[in-house]
Every structure is written in C-alpha cells, then in structure tokens.
Amino acid sequence: MLRIHGSARSRGLRTLWLVGELGIPYEHDDLLPRSPGTRTPEYLALNPNARVPTIEDDGFVLYESMAINFYLAKKYKSSLYPSDPHNEALAWQWSFWETDRLDRQQTTYANHTTGLPEAQRKPELAAAAWAEIEPAMDVLEGTLKKNRWLAGNDFSLADLNVAAAMYRSLTFDLGRWPAAREWLHRCWERPAAKRARAMRE
Ligand SMILES: N[C@@H](CCC(=O)N[C@@H](CS)C(=O)NCC(=O)O)C(=O)O
C-alpha cells in the first residue's frame, strides 16, 4: 500500500493531486511541515531532510515531490506520463525548471506579502522574490502563447507538476502573463486538482 507523508498544506499537494488523477488507493499521513512528527527518529529514517512529502510504497521510500510524481505516474502507467521521449524530457525540463526558477521564490513572495503576520513580513524579501518570478513568468508565457500544454498536445505530468507547484500563484496578479494565467486556471479546474485543493483550504 502506498503511504504519503505530507499535508496538502505542503508540497505534498502535488502528490495528492497526482494520486487523485491516478485513482489509486493510498494512506495519508497528514504531516505538517516543521511539525514534531517530521523530527521523530522514525520519520528521519525515511527522510533525513525532515521535510515533506515522503512516500513509502511497499517498502520503497522516496522523497522530493517531483521525483515522487515521476515515479508514481510511471509505475501506474498513467497516460499523464509522456510516452514520447521528447515529451518525457520536456516534462523533466519543466519540473526541474519550476523547482529552480519559481518554487521557493513564490513561497517567499506569498509569505512576505500575505502569508506571515504583518510584523514578520519583509518587503525587501518579497521584492527580491518578485524580481525572480517576473523573468520566469516571461519564459512560461512565451511557451504557453505558442502551446496549449507544456509537453505535447495534452495535459501531462509536466503541466501537473508545474501548475501544482504554482498553487501560490493562483492568488498573484498574473495579468501581465495572460496565457500562463489561463493555463494555470485551466489545470486547476481538473477534478483531481479541485479535490487536492479542498484538502488544503
Ligand atoms: N524539494 C523538496 C522540498 C520539500 C520541502 O521543503 N517541504 C517543506 C514543506 S512544503 C518542508 O517540509 N519544510 C520544512 C522545513 O523547512 O523545515 C520537495 O519538493 O519535496
């Protein structure tokens, strides 16, 4: 049985969206980031980074949300896993790209504009994060102006991984990037996305 450690209020959201798409059974350990449960010897033996998500799949342990999603989509022969090598590579590209160019930047921006109590917000950190988000969004917009999806002709793991990771951006003003904004909302309209989101909000 697949066991997912990690709350929907974490990067575990990506994996919860994916397992909803796959329609597979799983147990959910609703572990919040930085909670005491992430510091136990048992959990640290699974993920010495003390972070979520982590999965256990019949004894196989894996952390890093993007890697988890590639593993599960491939293992369950999901149509979301691109069969064409070029589209497969594009799914890797976009997932690594998101991790590098947008992941932490969005969290920092969200925390320091709305997420943290006002006294703890640092406008300079929000501004620095936004300065990295802007060129990344230009890149995404450039692709999505030409292509409806990130890897091939249909919604795929590339779209899921990037859109799921862009959960925070749903509340940002993305007016300057209309194609990316429309794509993001289109991805989040999927029933499995809505179910994962409902676990969080
Ligand atoms: N690159 C990792 C990042 C995991 C990560 O940083 N998770 C956050 C929650 S979204 C966490 O557990 N943070 C705990 C901490 O910062 O101590 C992934 O995508 O799985």
Image (cartoon, rainbow, N blue to C red):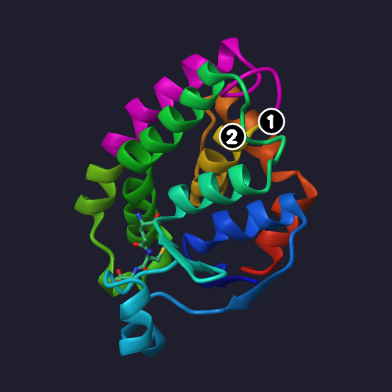
- Residue 159's label in the rendered image is 2
- Can residue 171 be seen by looking at this rendering? no
Q: Is residue 94 above or below residue 1?
A: above
The residues tagged by marks 1 and 2 sit, at their Cα atoms, a distance apart of 6 Å
Residue at x 69%, y 18% (from the top left corner): 153
Q: Report which residue position mark 1 lands on.
A: 155
Q: Nearer the viewer, residue 27 or 101?
A: 27
Which quarter of the figure has residue 187? Answer: top right
Q: Amino acid at mark 2?
A: Asp
Residue 69 rendering spot, x and y as whole percentages: 54, 49
Q: Is residue 151 magenta?
A: yes
In the drawing, does residue 60 fall left or right of residue 96? right
- Can residue 161 be seen by looking at this rendering? yes
Residue at x 73%, y 51% (from the top left corner): 22
Give the magenta-colored segment's residue range: 130-155
Q: Amino acid at mark 1?
A: Phe
Residue at x 38%, y 55% (from the top left corner): 107
Quadrant of the snapshot with the C terminus: bottom right
Residue 196 rendering spot, x and y as whole percentages: 67, 60
How many tags in the picture? 2
Q: Main secondary structure of the magenta part?
A: helix
- Looking at the rendered structure, the secondary structure element under dot 2 is helix
Residue 86 rendering spot, x and y as whole percentages: 51, 16
Which quarter of the figure has residue 149? Answer: top right
Quadrant of the snapshot with the N terminus: bottom right
**Does the residue at mark 1 contact the one at mark 2 (Cβ under 8 Å)?**
yes
Q: Is residue 72 magenta?
A: no
